[in-house]
Image (cartoon, rainbow, N blue to C red):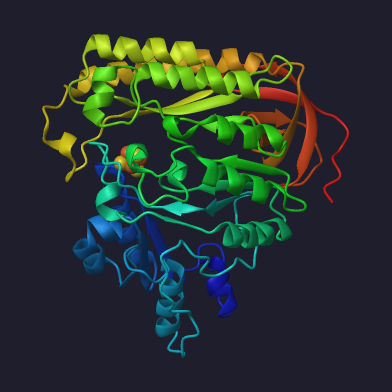
Amino acid sequence: MESILQERGMTSAPGSASPDLEIVHTCSVTGQAAAKSRNAIRRAKRNGKHVFVTGCFTGTDYSVATKIGDTVITQAGETPMLDRFAREVDMWLQRPTQADSRKTTSLPIASLPTIPGAHKRAELRIQDGCDAHCTFCIIPKIRTTLRSKTVEDTVIEATRLVELGHKEIIFTGVFIGAYGHKTALRRKQDSPNSEYLADLLDAVAQINGIKRLRISSMEPGDVTPILLDAMVANNNIVPHLHLPLQSGSDYVLQKMNRQYTVEQYLEMIAMVNERLTVDGLPPAITTDIICGFPTETEEDFERTVKAAQQVGYLHMHVFPYSVRTGTAAARWKQLPPEIVRGRVQKLLTLDEELSLAYRRQLIGKQVQIIIENQKEHEETFERGRCEYYAEITLKTNVKIGELVNATVTDVTSEHTFAKECLPILTN
Ligand code: SF4
């Protein structure tokens, strides 16, 4: 979006200046996210002169979005969203549009970026849409059609991001494991072995100059031997996977309409560990867990605790269950909030313990860090993420966005410290 605006001669409003245009890219995945999106639009309307609203809220709450925003661009339709965005910008600027209005069934590149994004690790969307219908999730109602970016288009976009200086590319999507498929339901897929995604990883990993490739999130059932072959064969694909567990109870997983059992999940983790452990260091596994889902008993919750301990996560993203109107689970009897809060707290404490235990295994290991934040407050330390996804604190003169070779020296519950080794030549 920023590239599209820059191509039309627009620049960021400096400091606290009131901009002519604000874009609110919304989220609607939970009721709380939708409320925050609403507030963000209202805030932008107060500050700015014209507000564009994009993102999922435009699908779940279209009439509200059009009432409180000025220009609303939904995800729906066959014309790529960024093409429609470019057309709306042209209309707002009152100039003849040059935006493409092609229709497509694959997920297209609308506009290649022309400037490096604010995030040093560039996100590249390779897939959109989900029809898995987890009972807590609204997404299948607003992004019903599954589409994937072709291998050729993904390589073009990734090459551009590398040329712009990004050292790491992260594949994103609503259901990445369904890459290349028309459905996310594995029982209905013609070839549910993730080979399309494995082929894509192989192709992008070969791009000249790409330092790191990461998958943002995978459904457990999509982690297959073929996919792990691709990860092992390309040493620039990082040894980290985000694999949502959501619950350690089969009963709750079934009520959630998830596509795996706890046993299958743990078997998959064992396979990942076996394939991706290097010099005794297992890959980093992170996860999402929903706490206090309707019907979750104390026993169910204890099963989640046990499963988490068995996996030994680097990080657990713990969500208290939040009612999303329009989903099946929203109609079920909810747990008392104090019970949910207590369970969340217990998991957060466990998260600290597990994270510390995993990061202790990094001590003495050499890692590569992309510097993301520099010199916070009065400190002399920089921060960045290593290939194992742990945030690392170290002293270095290397600039934001560049890679540093370092050895991990110490870990605390809040920090992972490292000492810089020889710099890496980036070209
Ligand atoms: S897999 Fe489930 S949680 Fe993920 S987008 Fe699809 S319905 Fe939502």
Q: Position of residue 1 (x, y in %)?
A: 51, 66
Q: Is 89 on the left-hand or right-hand side of 324?
A: right
In front of the other: 156 or 68: 156
Residue 175 location in percent, x, y? 41, 44
Foreground pick, 190 / 202: 190
In the displayed structure, does residue 258 sit left or right of residue 395? left
* Residue at 59% in and 77% down: 7
Q: Where ligand 1 lies, by quadrant?
A: top left
Seen in the picture, residue 91 relative to 165 is either above or below; the reply is below
| Residue 100 higher or lower than 357, as above or below | below
Q: Which residue is found at the position 39% from the left and 72% from the top?
A: 79
State the residue lying farthest toward the front: 190
In the displayed structure, 123 sits above or below 81; it is: above
Residue 203 is situated, as x and y percent measured from the top left of the image, at 66, 50
Horizontal and vertical percent for residue 258?
30, 31
Q: Is residue 309 left or right of residue 232?
A: left
**Is residue 292 in view?**
no
Q: Could you tell me which residue is drawn at 60 percent across and 55 percent down?
A: 118
